[in-house]
Image (cartoon, helix red, strand yellow):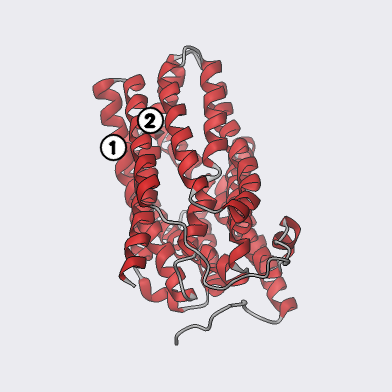
Amino acid sequence: MRQTAVEKMHIFIVMFFMSLVMSIQAPIFAPYAAKLGASSVLIGIMLSVASFTNLSGNLIAGPLVDRFGKKVFITLPIFISGTLFIAHALASSAASLLVLRALNGFSLAFLIPSALALLSSYAKNSQQQGKNMAINGILGTIASIIAPIIGGLLGAGIGYANTYYAIGGALLLIGIYTVYNLKEKENVIVVNSQAKPLSFMQVIQNPHLKVVFLTGFAVMYIHGVIIYEVPYLAVEQGLSTAVTGVLFSFFGVGTFFSLSLFFVHRFDPVKRLIFGLFGMCFSLFALFSGLLALPILLFCIGFFFGIMMPAMATAVTDAISNEGHGRAFGVMSAVYSMGMITSSFITGVVRDVVSPYFVAFLIGMLALTLIGYARLQSGSTTVTRTPYPY
């Protein structure tokens, strides 16, 4: 028991520092790209290309993780990404930075599905699964709050290029830590060697996973709209970037608060998904209707976001056997990327015609309607391999 806890702690440490180091570049990438001659349009293309390569990598990663194990696809991407970030500091043009950004997005696509699949293997039941994913979410939220501050200070203090050297060096150190401390978790149940591994079509057509993927797309679409639109709102109202950071902190605090409520993991993950998505939709309705102040609504959206993220990971592991976790988390990560890409594109197109918050509300309600219809058809709530301990 103690050995398992120590091994699980190493996963949390690796994922926390990965989130921290990766998020440090957030405030410096755009100005660094502009310094190399990239226009605002090209910077947007860089972000989109990274998302597309990440999406394609997610789909490739799943079968490989299931076949060759998880540790290798956690360790190698960390070393590759560290090397690519050092290359960022050596970039001489915007074109070279674009290529490096695309390659980095592809390499990191293998990391998240592998790490989530490895973390999920340390849970004995759905409630433990929810707690593990919630702890990971808390650590990621903390990293996302403090990392931009660190990145801004480093960028102002030692310059953009040297900051990328620091990011790359830190990732290489994390990679070394991973090699020596991360352990591949062996399944207790021996699977028949003649059994065929789950295909992507079996994963995608799983009725319980369809609900998770549909919810994941809607949630990340809403999240993408918030990330895109709140800075624009601040600019339009003549507010400083510091105010924008404070607004986003309300979202982070709401997420942190809900992730800290460990008792919610006693409830069915699919019901948590429905509750969270309904709450996000209601908050969006209040947002474009002007019913409540923006900071309060961002806190509420962050709260429901924190309810849903661990529930989605738990629902995936409840609906599919261990040998299919790599593929399932790969598809889920790809769905997340698709939601972010779609929201950025649609928001940029429609924001002068209709409120992007209203469009996000419609997409969330459509997802809720389809989920309700799917549950009525199936006549069941979820499939679990182990009973809930209550």
Q: Position of residue 379 (x, y in %)?
A: 70, 82
Disc 1 residue type (three-letter): Ile
Instruction: Say which of marks 2 and 1 sits in front.
Output: 2
Q: Nearer the viewer, residue 156 or 278?
A: 156
Disc 2 residue type (three-letter): Gly
Q: For the residues marked 2 and 1, what is the alpha-carbon distance in whole angstroms?
A: 18 Å
Q: Nearer the viewer, residue 158 or 37?
A: 158
The answer to whether the residues at label 2 and label 1 have Cβ atoms under 8 Å apart is no
Q: Nearer the viewer, residue 306 or 49?
A: 49
Q: Which residue is mark 2?
A: 168
Residue at (31% x, 33% y) in the render: 151
The mark that comes first in sequence, 2 or 1, is 1
Residue at (45% x, 18% y) in the render: 34
Vertical placement of 206 versus 85: above or below?
below
Residue 173 seen in the figure: yes
Q: Position of residue 187 (x, y in %)?
A: 53, 67
Q: Position of residue 127 (x, y in %)?
A: 45, 75
Vertical placement of 187 versus 237: above or below?
below
Residue at (44% x, 28% y) in the render: 83
Mark 1 Cα-neighbour bin, 10 Å: few <14, some 14–19, many ≥20: some
* Quadrant in the picture for the N terminus: bottom left
What secondary structure is marked by label 2? Answer: helix
What secondary structure is marked by label 1? Answer: helix
Vertical placement of 119 versus 340: above or below?
below
